[in-house]
Image (cartoon, rainbow, N blue to C red):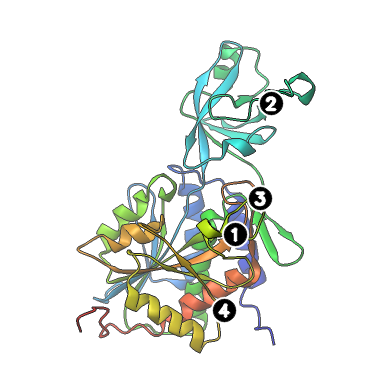
Amino acid sequence: MAKESILTQKSIQFLEKYLNNASPTGYEWEGQKIWMDYLKPYVDDFITDIYGTAVGVINPDAPFKVVIEGHSDEISWYVNYITDNGLIYVIRNGGSDHQVAPSKVVNIHTKNGIVKGVFGWPAIHTRDKQEEDAPKPDNIFIDIGAKDKEEVEKMGVHVGCVITYPDEFFILNNDKFVCRAIDNRAGGFMIAEVARLLHENKVKLPFGLYITNSVQEEIGLRGAEMITQTIKPNVAIVTDVCHDTTTPMIEKKKQGHTEIGKGPVISYAPAVQNRLRELILDTAEQKEIPFQRMAASRMTGTDTDAFAYSNGGVASALISLPLRYMHTTVETVHRDDVENVIRLIYETLQKIDPKMSFSYFD
C-alpha cells in the first residue's frame, strides 16, 4: 500500500514559487527570502551571513548541534564581452552547459530590471554539413535585439551582468517535478519540509537543529565552507541531487546505477562518516523507506565535503535525490523520491542522541 503523501498544497505552491525565482550563484538573496518566509513558523530563530547563507534554528541554546543542509544557488552565465554590433558573449557562473544554450531564451539581470535575450545559433541551412561546429563556450552568443554596443549599454546591460534561464516549474505525468534549478533548490525545499513536519507533529529534539540553505555550492562549496565555521556543528546531514543513470548516453560502469522513483540515494565516500551513514541506513530499513546506494571516489562533490573536513572534523553524511538531465532547464525528479528524502531525514533526526558517539574507537 502506498504511503500517504506528506506534501500539502501549500508545500507544492512554495516549491513552485521557490523554483521559479532566479537565484544564480552570488545572487541568491531573493530566493533565500522566499525560503525564510516559508520556514519562519517552524523555527525559533534565523542566522544569516554576509554572503547570503540562511539558517533556521530550532533549540538555539542547545550545546549539541545538528545540521541538515541543501544549497540555494543555480547555475547561470555572466556577460563577458559585448561586440561592436551588439552581440553578447558569456562565461559560466557555475557548471552551465554550453550544449543546451542555442535557441534558449534568457533573462539578463540589470539594475533596471530584466532584459530579455536569446542564445542565437546559425540556421541549419547555412551550416557546413560536413564540418559543423558544435556549441562551445567561445561560440555561443546572446542577441538582445540591439543594433550596436551603445544600444546594449543603454539597455542597462554591461560586463558582469548575470544571466539566467526563465524556464518554470511544471508537473510531468502527475508525479515528476520539472524545472531548472531543482539542483539544488529541491534540497532547500526538502529540509524546510522536515522542519514543517517536526513542528506539526510536535517533535521535541534533544539538540539544536540548524536547517541550513547554503550559497555558492556551484562554484566550489563556498557557502558551506563559511557557515560551518559559524555553526560549528557536531553532525551534518547534507542533501543534494545525483544522476539518474538510466537515461541514454550514460555509462553505468562509470556512473553507477541510480534512478528516479527508486528512493533516496545514500553515499559511500571518504567524507561520509560510516557510523552516521549506518544510522541512516538502519533508519531507512526500520521505517521501510526505499533507498539506493552510490559510491564516490575521492570526494562527493557536494557540501558534505565542506562540512566533513571543517572544525577538526564533523560527522557528515549525504542523502541524494536522483535527478534526470542535471544542469539543463528540464531537470526532472520523482515526487516519491522527494517525499522519501524528507521522510528519511525526519526519521533519522529522531534517532540522534547527543550522548551517542560516532567515533570508531568507542
Residue type highlighted by circle 1: Thr
Earlier sequence position, callout 3 versus callout 2: 2
> Mark 3 to mark 2: distance in Å?
20 Å
Residue type highlighted by circle 4: Pro
* Circle nearer the viewer, 2 or 1: 1
Earlier sequence position, callout 2 versus callout 1: 2
The residue that mark 4 highlights is 290
The residue that mark 1 highlights is 245
Crowding near pointer 2: few (<14 within 10 Å), some, many (20+)? some
> Mark 2 to mark 4: distance in Å?
44 Å
Vertical side of 248 occupied by 61: above or below: below
Q: Residue 46's quadrant in the figure?
A: bottom left
- Which residue is found at the position 42% from the left and 61% from the top? 296
Secondary element at image label 3: loop
Crowding near pointer 1: few (<14 within 10 Å), some, many (20+)? many
The residue that mark 3 highlights is 330
Check contact, mark 2 vs mark 1: CB within 8 A.
no
Check contact, mark 1 vs mark 3: CB within 8 A.
no
> Mark 3 to mark 4: distance in Å?
25 Å
Residue type highlighted by circle 2: Trp
The residue that mark 2 highlights is 121
Q: Is residue 37 visible?
A: no
Vertical side of 93 occupied by 304: above or below: below
Residue type highlighted by circle 3: Val
Residue 37, given in percent of the width and then of the height, sits at 50, 61
Q: Nearer the viewer, residue 29 or 180?
A: 180
Crowding near pointer 3: few (<14 within 10 Å), some, many (20+)? some
Check contact, mark 2 vs mark 4: CB within 8 A.
no
Earlier sequence position, callout 1 versus callout 4: 1
Q: Residue 119's quadrant in the figure?
A: top right
